[in-house]
């Protein structure tokens, strides 16, 4: 009975658009699903540094290199804000990292695709950051305060990321026939995986209905995917690109674009760990984690020494 009243009060509080803060009472399921989602989001930012990091040394000019370096650094920062937001729910960062390294915790499917040309970097900024923004602008209104505040900050940086990617695409679209071909090829490879970033269709989404009630999620996977398609088609047309979907067409009645069926088998395989780069990505993070062990140990030893010194001078 007491639990029922607590749940009712919690729901009323959320329904009135209040933010839940770290020390507030919350249902265990709310805490758990947030740790899962924020953890997955943080891991995505960290693993997401790898495909673009692959091009830092090969960026075509100093200007492009400096911009890409700054973008990849921003992603590390986003990962850190998000790990901190998850820690407010009572999980520690090492546990989250170990779960990602063991394959228990997921990260976004999109980062399991290779970056094989410079046009991929433009396309990732344009499409991947573009899709991330559509999802995260919606999540800025999530009911959990620390996550919402982290997202407000992240979105400001993501819009710079999206623009830098689109600007690379514009340059390529005005370039030689070879550059135009390279851009179309990158677009062909990233279009469908970008649509998959929004998750399974609503009817197959395990967490959506409860998380919409708790206002963790504010829009459904399919609604956000549709929004992304609607805003991206004109951008692709401006670049002179052909969208790799014969079923894509404007629907006068709905006021939206209709588009073809996503290859859900491919999506499920990538999420299960069988995408083109899953093993490579996790292996890179495992290597970094084990090579960084001495840094973590040294930081703890230094913090202990400082604590001892402070205790001695206080005595
Ligand atoms: N990949 O029931 P739902 C970025 C999993 S950040 C892998 O619909 P939910 C920035 C899902 O976890 C990109 N797994 O789940 C950047 C669940 O698994 P579980 C990341 C996926 O949570 C740009 C199961 O499928 N953004 O790109 C995917 O209600 C450039 C059932 O799905 C976020 O994480 C997927 N695509 O909705 C960085 C945003 N989709 O745990 C570097 C926050 C679903 O039951 C470079 N997250 N799954 O085993 C969210 O908004 C939600 O978690 C969704 C999924 C919408 C991703």
Image (tube, grey):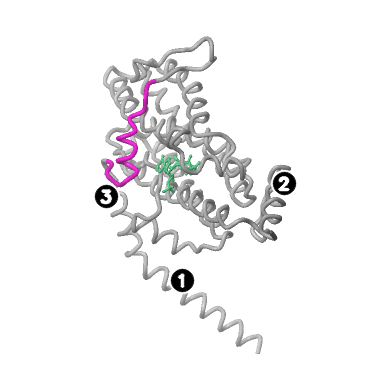
Residue found 69% across the figure and 56% down from its top: 6
Residue 263 in the magenta stretch? The answer is yes
**Beta carbon of the mark 3 residue lies under 8 A of ligand 1:** no
Q: Dot 2 corresponds to which residue?
A: 12
Mark 2 or 3, nearer chain start:
2
Badge number at residue 299: 1
What residue is at 45 percent from the left and 27 percent from the top?
167
The one of 141 and 283 positioned closer to us in this rendering: 141
Which mark, residue 240?
none
Q: Which residues are magenta?
A: 260-275
The extreme front residue here reads 1
Query: How far separated are the C-alphas under marks 1 and 2?
Result: 44 Å
Quarter assignment of residue 31:
bottom right
Between 240 and 15, the one lying in front of the other is 15
Give how far across and how far down residue 78 sits, in percent. Answer: 51, 48
> Which of the two discs, 1 and 2, labels the residue nearer the N terminus?
2
Q: CA distance from mark 3 to mark 1?
A: 30 Å
Q: Marks 1 and 2: which is nearer the front?
A: 2
Instruction: For marks 2 and 3, give the CA distance.
Output: 44 Å
Locate residue 14 relative to residue 249 in the image: left or right.
right
Q: Which mark is residue 279?
A: 3
Which circle, 2 or 3, is nearer the viewer? 2
User: Going 41% across and 59% down the picture, which residue do you hit?
Assistant: 97
Contact between marks 3 and 1 (CB within 8 A): the answer is no
- Name the main secondary structure of what is drawn in magenta: helix
Near-viewer residue (291 or 17): 17
Crowd class of label 1 (few under 14; some 14 to 19; many from 20; radius 10 Å): few
Q: Are marks 2 and 3 in contact (CB under 8 Å)?
A: no
């Amino acid at each position: 009975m007491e639990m029922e009243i607590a749940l009712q009060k919690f729901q009323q509080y959320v329904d009135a658009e209040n933010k839940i803060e770290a020390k507030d009472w919350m249902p265990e399921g709310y805490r758990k699903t947030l740790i899962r989602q924020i953890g997955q989001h943080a891991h995505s930012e960290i693993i997401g540094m790898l495909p673009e990091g692959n091009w830092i040394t090969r960026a075509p000019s100093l200007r492009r290199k400096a911009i890409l370096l700054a973008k990849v650094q921003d992603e590390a920062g986003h990962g850190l804000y998000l790990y901190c937001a998850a820690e407010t729910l009572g999980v520690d960062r090492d546990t989250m990292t170990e779960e990602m390294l063991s394959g228990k915790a997921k990260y976004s499917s999109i980062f399991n695709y290779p970056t094989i040309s410079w046009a991929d970097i433009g396309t990732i900024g344009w499409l991947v950051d573009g899709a991330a923004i559509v999802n995260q602008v919606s999540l800025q209104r999530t009911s959990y305060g620390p996550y919402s505040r982290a997202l407000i900050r992240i979105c400001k940086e993501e819009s710079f990321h999206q623009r830098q990617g689109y600007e690379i695409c514009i340059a390529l679209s005005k370039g030689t026939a070879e550059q135009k071909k390279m851009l179309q090829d990158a677009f062909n490879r990233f279009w469908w995986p970008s649509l998959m970033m929004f998750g399974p269709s609503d009817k197959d989404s395990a967490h959506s209905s409860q998380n919409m009630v708790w206002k963790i999620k504010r829009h459904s996977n399919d609604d956000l995917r549709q929004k992304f398609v609607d805003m991206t088609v004109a951008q692709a047309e401006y670049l002179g690109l052909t969208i790799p979907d014969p079923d894509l067409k404007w629907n006068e009645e709905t006021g939206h674009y209709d588009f073809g069926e996503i290859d859900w088998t491919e999506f499920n395989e990538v999420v299960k760990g069988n995408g083109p780069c899953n093993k490579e990505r996790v292996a890179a993070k495992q290597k970094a984690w084990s090579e960084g062990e001495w840094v973590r140990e040294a930081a703890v030893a230094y913090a202990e020494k400082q604590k001892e010194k402070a205790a001695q001078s206080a005595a």
